[in-house]
Image (cartoon, grey):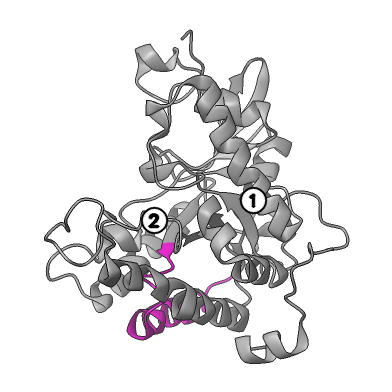
Amino acid sequence: MNRRDFITKTSLGTSVIAIPGIVGAVENTSEPKIQDSAKSFWPNGARLAISISLQFEAGGQPISGASGLIPEPIKKGYPDLATNSYFDYGVQEGIPRMLDLFDKYGVKATSFMVGKAVDNHPELAREIVIRGHEPAAHGKEWAWQYNMSKDEEREWIRSVKQSIEKVTGVTPLGYDCYWMRGSVHTLSLLQELGFIYHNNDLSRDEPYIQQLNGKPFVTMPYTIHMNDIGSFDFPGFSPADYEQQLKDEFDQLYEEAATRRRMMLISFHDRISGHASRVRVIERFFKYVAQHDGIWYATKGELAKHALATPDTTPMVKRDVAEKSGLAGNTNL
């Protein structure tokens, strides 16, 4: 079903969505093809999990001073009309185009939503969830959480959680900070507020668990090198280059996945990958993946729940407090 048919047949009114059987993250009904293997690291015999992030940020950026395609900064405080139109592309064209593509190939993604973006475009946030994708939190708006007091940060996280719940009827289970930079308190606050995973880590190609305040909490690693905001910002880097990078990343991880648990991470932004030429690249990659058995397109919520349910397979990471290790975890501050 394309987006026009979807909107015609589905009510996207202002009421909260009632989705039977869903508690927290959206359930993914797609099942991977079964592989012949002596040992499987994922459900239903899947060999490789592919985790796609869809960043919903349009409308969450500051009206002046947001980074965009124009290198020269605008006068402080003056509305940057051109840059704001660049972000608005994500709402008007980018996300709708990617949702149609995901439907075509049965792909389920996790959409990290900025609270202000949800407040400004509730109908799109609802549509993302109705079409089977997981809503996750991406901060109230664009600001550094590490500059906040612990109480301020708690309310900041609570605010975006409430925005998503109010509009979609679904409680987010995952969190992604602005440019991944949280505070030493972020993980414990997320756990306190009912989240089960965070996304601000670049250290592995599989999820892992830490004990926070005596309870398990999942790290779902993120990606920069397979992230459109990192790739397309390189001078001379083309959509064709990104397509080859996606295939090479897939091939290596698929090979490794014969003997260990592997997860491929990809991140798309509403205003970047949603352009027509770039969606063609993504579609060619999906076609390439479809030639292989044992693929599970999983939401991060599904992967986090599976990690918690398989402690014999999921790495348990023990590290010193954040202010000593320099890595996210517990803190004495």
Q: Residue furthest right?
A: 20
Q: Residue at x 38, y 72 (%)?
A: 273
Relative height, residue 168 to residue 275 (above, below): above
Residue 191 visible in this rendered orientation of the protein: yes
Q: Quadrant of residue 276?
A: bottom left
Mark before the other along the chain sequence, 1 or 2:
2
- Where does the image place residue 299, in percent across and percent down from the top left? 62, 57
Residue in front for this viewpoint, 2 or 148: 148
What's the amino acid at mark 1?
Ser
Residue pointed to by mark 1: 163
Residue 61 disc label: 2
Q: Secondary structure at mark 2?
A: loop
Q: Secondary structure at mark 1?
A: helix
Q: Is residue 286 magenta?
A: yes
Residue 42 visible in this rendered orientation of the protein: no
Q: Residue at x 29, y 72 (%)?
A: 244
Residue in front for this viewpoint, 291 or 222: 222
Tally of numbered discs: 2
Label 1, label 2: how far apart the Cα atoms are: 16 Å
Q: Is residue 38 left or right of residue 147?
A: right
What crowding class fits label 1: few (fewer than 14 Cα within 10 Å), some (14-19), or many (20 or more)? many
Magenta region: 268-294
Q: Is residue 187 magenta?
A: no
- Where does the image place residue 248, in percent across and percent down from the top left? 33, 65
Q: Is residue 289 left or right of residue 154?
A: left
What's the amino acid at mark 2?
Gln
Q: Quadrant of residue 64?
A: bottom left
